Image: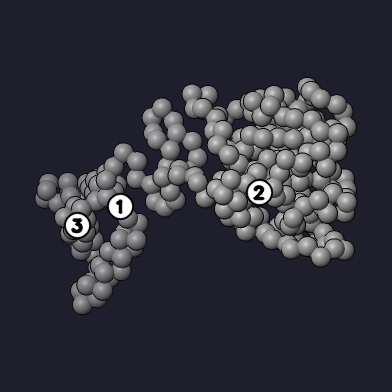
Amino acid sequence: MSGTDHTQENPKSPGPCVILVEPQLGENIGTAARAMANFGLHDMRLVAPRDGWPNERAGKAASGADWILEGASIHADTVQAVSDLNYVYATTARPRDMVKEVITPEQAGLDMRRRIAAGQKVGILFGRERIGLLNEEISLADVIMMAPVNPAFASINVAQAVLLVGYEWYKHEATTLGQATPQEAALTGPGLQQAGSTPATKEQLEGFFQHLERELTDCGFLRPPEKAPSMMRSIRNIYMRCQLTAHEVSSLRGIVSGLTYKHTRGKQSE
């Protein structure tokens, strides 16, 4: 269960409930629970699971998201599962012969946050593995959620669908990326990471460039002499794009010294 930090408490803040309508396979229920745990969701509702409940295979597939399975509620039908909700989203991949607004998972994530902040209870309907949601079930929803997928292959596994929607819900509150470790805190955002070092100062960079220029001049690389300034500018720009750290500049200077050691030693002997 790489990526699971058992020292952290699982969030129980208000969020949308995940309603799986007549799920057939315990493995899909378990992987859906795992996807929910990834993105801070905890309210799972199961409508008439085919193989009954509890399901041993669901527990194995959940990879540690046991609290979600243990807290899952069982409902005889979809009407019962949504009875206490103020607003319901129905997921589907195909057009339906009904007048109903269609939104994307990204739009739904923002809409769910707005509604929950206003005190509403919301839920998301996910259909059967083989045929999805019936029109009668979609009619219980206030809006249809449809993802921008390849129209030639639009079928999404139920756990994948939960993962997709869960991400769009959670990304607006996430403050870090990935997982923290005993050695390093979780990353605070995308971009170049410089763990264990600081960006090189201009003085350190200039020292490296002068060192490199001396050795390139000495070995005859910067020729003809009149082109040396423009050649060095190009070389500087290559390294400046790298956003070097102080440690990296030190390593580069060591590399230059190592490559020129034999040549330098030979000159000193002469």
Measured Cα–Cα span from mark 2 to mark 3: 45 Å
Q: Are marks 3 and 1 in contact (CB under 8 Å)?
A: no
Name the amino acid type tagged 2: Val
Secondary element under disc 3, as helix, strand or loop, is helix
Tell whether 73 sits left or right of 106. right
Taking depth in this image into account, of 53 and 255 the one nearest to the observer is 53
| Residue denoted by label 2 | 165
**Residue mark closest to the camera, 1 vs 2:** 2
Locate residue 264, reporting x and y percent: 18, 50
Q: Are marks 1 and 2 in contact (CB under 8 Å)?
A: no
- Residue 37 appears in view: yes
Q: Is residue 66 above or below residue 115?
A: above
Measured Cα–Cα span from mark 1 to mark 2: 38 Å
Secondary element under disc 1, as helix, strand or loop, is loop
Please report the residue visible at 74 percent of the width from the left and 63 percent of the height from the top.
101
Q: Is residue 66 above or below residue 259?
A: above
Q: Is residue 160 above or below residue 151?
A: above
- Residue 61 appears in view: no
Please report the residue visible at 31 percent of the width from the left and 65 percent of the height from the top.
237
Using a 10 Å C-alpha cutoff, classify the residue at mark 2 as few (fewer than 14 neighbours), some (14 to 19) or many (20 or more). many
Measured Cα–Cα span from mark 3 to mark 1: 10 Å
| Residue denoted by label 1 | 244
Taking depth in this image into account, of 136 and 105 the one nearest to the observer is 136
Name the amino acid type tagged 3: Lys
Q: Is residue 248 above or below residue 43?
A: below
| Residue denoted by label 3 | 202
Locate residue 242, reporting x and y percent: 35, 56
The numbered mark, 2 or 3, whose residue comes first in the sequence reads 2
Tell whether 217 sits left or right of 193. left
Secondary element under disc 2, as helix, strand or loop, is helix
Locate residue 246, reporting x and y percent: 25, 47
